[in-house]
Image: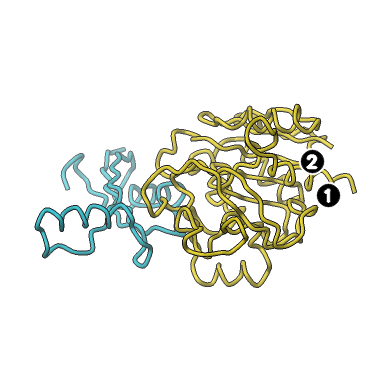
Chain colours: A yellow, B cyan
Amino acid sequence: MKFAVVVFPGSNCDHDAYYALKHNLGYNVEFLWHKDTSIPKDIDCVVLPGGFSYGDYLRAGAIARFSPIMNEVINFANRGGLVIGICNGFQILTESGLLPGALLKNTSLRFICRDVYIKVNSNNNPFTSLLEKGRVLRIPIAHFEGNYFADEDTLKELEDNDQIVFQYCDEKGNISEMANPNGSLKNIAGIVNKQRNVLGMMPHPERYCDSILGGTDGIWIFNSIANFLNK
Amino acid sequence: MAKYFAKVIVMLKKGILDVQGKTVENSLKTLGFDKIADIRIGKHITFEVEANSLDEAKEIANAAVDKLLYNPNIETYTIEVENSTGKL
């Protein structure tokens, strides 16, 4: 089982993801470059990391979406390969059409960098396979454009197909406007595609895989992926 | 081949809260402009197109907008393509 972390110009959580996977969790992992035109055959899960790919110019993720590697990521996902997009990675996934909807500016118009609580709304996917529904995780967010938006039909489809994986909540798991940091519809913090092999999430699990960094709840997500792949 | 000039305006769809516009609107209201409402802020993008005809230039410009310059999930656009560079 092997992970790959894609490096775009402007990625800044690529090394965090690599470190968490390799050194905190002991998994095999390698970097892929945005100009690469293939994904090695031994890769099981591709990580699109956080950051500001291409300076967030035009729209966050819009230009990264046309990097040569993204054609391969789209093919990889269409073949059933696992893809997890974190923060800017989530934005790239919506821009590329692998996930529905879009991420708008936070309603506060502020860059928000702090811990949030998210509730596991669905575990019927590889990324939360080790977690029970209703479980609350504490994971940091760091973004300016994390306000999830989808039109009514898309939102209904997400709900009907159980695609909403994480929702912002309070410490006790209550989903409320107060616990919504950025204005996201339905407090959405993470979703999967219909085929359930592509996850996008705004919170940064790779930042909470080491107790000296303040938390370890991020481990659950990567271990869930590994658990799924090793089955 | 002649040069044409394209002017694109990209706006958030109606119904999507434009938080930037809202903040500017609130500021203007604070400054006494109480007759101003519904401010929305978009993007103004201009570029040159080399083409054999105005129709071809329009086709190229529209394709570019559809491919990259706007996100149909959240935005709408208007486009004008004209003959003389820089003069619309």
Mark on residue A39? none
Point 36% across, 48% down: residue: A109
Q: How would you rate the neighbour count of disc 1 (Cα within 10 Å): few for under 14, some for 14-19, many for 20 or more?
A: some
Left or right, B35 with respect to A171, comes to: left
Q: Amino acid at mark 1?
A: Phe
Q: How would you rate the neighbour count of disc 2 (Cα within 10 Å): few for under 14, some for 14-19, many for 20 or more?
A: many
* Rendered view: A193 above or below A8: below
Return the residue at label 1. A228
Mark on residue A44? 2
Pinpoint the chain carrying mark 1. A
* Rendered view: A173 above or below A98: below
Which of the two residues, B52 or A92, is positioned nearer the viewer here? Answer: A92
Q: Residue furthest right?
A: A231
Q: Amino acid at mark 2?
A: Asp
Point 43% across, 59% down: residue: B74
Mark before the other along the chain sequence, 1 or 2: 2
